[in-house]
Amino acid sequence: MTAMLPPRARFPVGQGGFTLIEVLVSLLILSVLAATAWKGMDGISTARQVADGNLKQTLRLQSVMTQMESDMGQVMDTMIVNGMQFDGAHLRLTRRVAEGVQVVVWYVQRGRLLRWASPVTYKFGELQKYWMSSYQLRGKEPGTLTALKGVEQWQVYCFRSGAMSNCQSTGNVFTQPTQAQGAASGATGGQSGLGALMREQLPNAIRSQLTLGEGSGFGGTLTRDIMLAPQPTQN
């Protein structure tokens, strides 16, 4: 019996597969497109990171200014220590809170704007102790927070009697009689210079000028005018 061979397969004339050169060209085109797409995605990612960083720095700066405005809005002149005092480096103030009063100090140290807040108290002796201890701050005390980095200089001006002036002007100081002086005056019918306390008059507003540099994410001088809203003294 003679074996039958299968019929020869027939292919349409003129049709065939891709050549090696065509495959290589296609792969090259795909590689270029992939590299271009990757660079575009990397650029978008970098731009997003920069934008997020700038947004965080802006929000940080805004929160610092908000906190400073909140402190100024709660200034309370207890008649025991100064309600507010700026000595050229430290801005000290007594701030009223729900539980009593606390001393708050803003100051610049080694390129950082720091904020220190004392424990809350309602005792005159403790308030005087916290106020005096604020003259010895080193930046590591409990209650100290780094508010802002990259601060090169800080200046504060006070608005009093319709004009902006240096907060350290001697014209802003007045003499307040103490309880001992008042008692002596009442007993003798005159006025005594003993027991007088030199105090600084509270301004109506302050002007804060922060010179920002490397590390802050900004450059130049940030000026902010802040109104004071002195709280009434509790009897």
Image (spheres, rainbow, N blue to C red):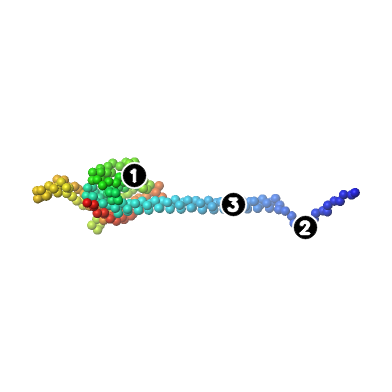
Q: Amino acid at mark 3?
A: Ala
Check contact, mark 3 vs mark 2: CB within 8 A. Answer: no
Numbered disc 1: secondary structure: strand
Answer left or right for 186 relative to 170. left
Q: Position of residue 41 (x, y in %)?
A: 54, 52
Q: Residues within 10 Å of mark 2 (few under 14, many from 20)?
A: few
Which mark is first along the chain, 2 or 1? 2
Q: Residue at x 19, y 51 (%)?
A: 174
Q: Nearer the observer, disc 1 or disc 2?
A: 1
Decide which of tag 1 and tag 3 comes sooner along the chain: 3
Q: Which residue is mark 2?
A: 12
Q: How far is the residue under mark 1 from the one under mark 3?
A: 51 Å
Q: Which residue is mark 3?
A: 34
Q: Residue at x 33, y 47 (%)?
A: 115
Q: Is residue 201 left or right of residue 31?
A: left
Residue at disc 2, secondary structure: loop
Which picture quadrant has residue 11? bottom right
Which residue lies at the image location 31% right of the left edge and 55% below the top edge?
Answer: 226
